[in-house]
DNA sequence: CGACGCTTTGACACAACTCAACAACCGTGG
DNA sequence: CCACGGTTGTTGAGTTGTGTCAAAGCGTCG
């Protein structure tokens, strides 16, 4: 059974930070005790609600977002397999953003009490959580920079390079190609653009043989050039 | 001496989350053992460098930012008295952003070892750090939403309302007025705009008697209307 | 087959940027 | 004291990237 302990994307991610003890791995395994299958379009966290749970995603895609009064939406991030989300909602008592699944998948809920118990009982594990959260925040910051100071083209290129890197870590990239269930409307809400303009940008990327998104599949033809355009520096 | 323990903006902020024990307050006080006066324009954190320290700001203003290859800059946040910054740089080993002071002030450096020791020795304190970091991240997310989905006017209005709230917490707002050392160039880098356009927006806000920024002093004339325009909801 | 969601394209409008010039302010040194 | 240069703020005219509106083409699924 010990072999099983580490066999979740999330545990693997944390292990990249510190070598967790058996007890710590057990604690992580406990979080995965009750995995549930979630349908596409499931609302996992609701902005403004209290008592929301955090989640670890074992498979599938989700998106963290905020709705605006004028009907617009801004997507913050796209949690994928091995990612944790909703932590702020737990720590701050009331969720500051919403989360919805974009595909069906498997998720494990983490109740507030469970989280604080882990942090206090296993400080090193708490630090690992902190580290993982920092990595995620780093992505959010880069996202902010993109939207603030990059053109639509640069921004889009940067986004897909980042996405590739995230998915590569969990083994979801094969030959510069990966599955990507994001529609142009969803991309627009993430990139701070219009779906129509996203379409134009994708066309340009396609025509210049840099990147193709077709039928939920992204292929990066010229990563070198994309990095030049977007100013993307790995991590 | 016990009375002194809590008498830093940072300790007061953490205490808002959990009532810290005497030992924990001592640990926080240790962080403030070596306050240093920093000049305006001091580079406290350098993006890409390893072994950077985190800081607690006792007074003055700073800004966290990232430089882009094309010479642009995006400001992430404006740490003020009581704020902590550079934590990600410590946890991720290499700083993912830079920090520079915008005014002279007083700051306390937190070395990496010191931080991890505190987290492991005082888990509850670690949780408090985590909580404070979450609050900051919440601001960054709101900032992201602003830049992605709000017009220049909405965005600027939102920014100043948020700023007012942050400064009010540390007692720096008096009669809807507060000191604000941000130039229009700095504002532009924060809001994802041009200094010239910031100027135009500020003019509009002034002419419509909503908000005035003159000689480093902001006065909010019509908070009600500003909230309507920007969709700002407190916290 | 029809209905629906997603993509694609074109013509036009507008918000924000660029360029250029000038005015106010501020600290410095003659 | 005033002259000075540098930084910051202000304004106008013209450009451009992105949004808006409208319509049609595709896939897929019931």
Image: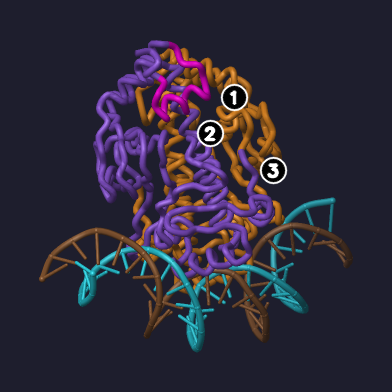
Chain colours: A orange, B purple, C brown, D cyan
Give SS at disc 2: strand
Query: Which chain hosts label 1?
Result: A
Residue B121, percent from left and from top: 36, 14
Give the Cα separation between the discs numbered 3 and 1: 20 Å
Q: Do the residues labelled 2 and 3 touch (CB within 8 Å)?
A: no
Who comes first in sequence, dot 1 or dot 2?
Answer: 2
Between B58 and C18, the one nearer to me in the picture: B58
Q: For the magenta stretch, what is the residue range?
A: B6-21
Who comes first in sequence, dot 2 or dot 3?
Answer: 3
Question: Residue C5's image quarter?
Answer: bottom right
Between B73 and B100, the one nearer to me in the picture: B100
Residue A63, percent from left and from top: 60, 45
Q: Are marks 1 and 2 on the same chain?
A: yes
Residue located 58% across and 52% down the image? B220
Task: Report which residue position mark 3 lands on.
Answer: A40
Q: Are marks 1 and 2 in contact (CB under 8 Å)?
A: yes
Q: Nearer the viewer, mark 3 or mark 1?
A: 1
Give SS at disc 3: loop
Task: Report which residue position mark 1 lands on.
Answer: A110
Residue B99, percent from left and from top: 33, 46
Q: Along the horizontal axis of the image, is A28 left or right of A75? A: left
Vertical relation: B169 (above or below) A167: above
Who comes first in sequence, dot 3 or dot 1?
Answer: 3
Query: Which chain hosts label 3?
Result: A
Tag shown at residue A84? 2
Specify few, some or many for label 3: CA neighbours under 10 Å numbering under 14, 14-19, or 20 or more. some
Quarter holding the N terminus of chain B is: top left
Is residue A182 shown to the viewer in this render?
no
Does the magenta run of residues contain B15?
Answer: yes
Does the magenta run of residues contain B181?
Answer: no
């Amino acid at each position: 059974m010990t072999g099983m302990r580490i066999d979740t994307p999330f545990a693997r991610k944390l292990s990249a930070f510190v070598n967790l003890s058996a007890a710590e791995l057990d604690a992580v395994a406990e979080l995965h005790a009750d995995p549930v299958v979630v349908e596409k379009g499931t609302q996992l966290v609701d902005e403004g609600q209290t008592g929301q749970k955090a989640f670890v995603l074992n498979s599938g895609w989700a998106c963290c977002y905020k709705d605006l009064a004028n009907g617009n939406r801004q997507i913050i991030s796209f949690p994928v397999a091995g990612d944790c989300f909703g932590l702020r909602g737990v720590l701050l008592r009331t969720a500051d953003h919403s989360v919805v699944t974009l595909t069906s998948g498997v998720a494990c809920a983490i109740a507030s009490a469970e989280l604080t118990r882990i942090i206090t009982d296993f400080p090193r594990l708490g630090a690992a959580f902190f580290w993982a959260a920092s990595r995620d925040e780093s992505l959010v910051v880069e996202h902010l920079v993109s939207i603030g100071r990059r053109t639509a083209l640069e921004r889009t290129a940067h986004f897909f390079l980042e996405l590739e890197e995230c998915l590569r870590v969990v083994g979801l990239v094969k030959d510069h190609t990966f599955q990507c269930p994001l529609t142009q409307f969803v991309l627009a809400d993430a990139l701070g653009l219009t779906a129509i303009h996203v379409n134009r940008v994708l066309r340009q990327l396609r025509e210049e043989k840099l990147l193709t998104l077709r039928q939920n599949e992204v292929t990066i033809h010229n990563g070198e050039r994309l990095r030049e355009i977007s100013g993307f520096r790995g991590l």
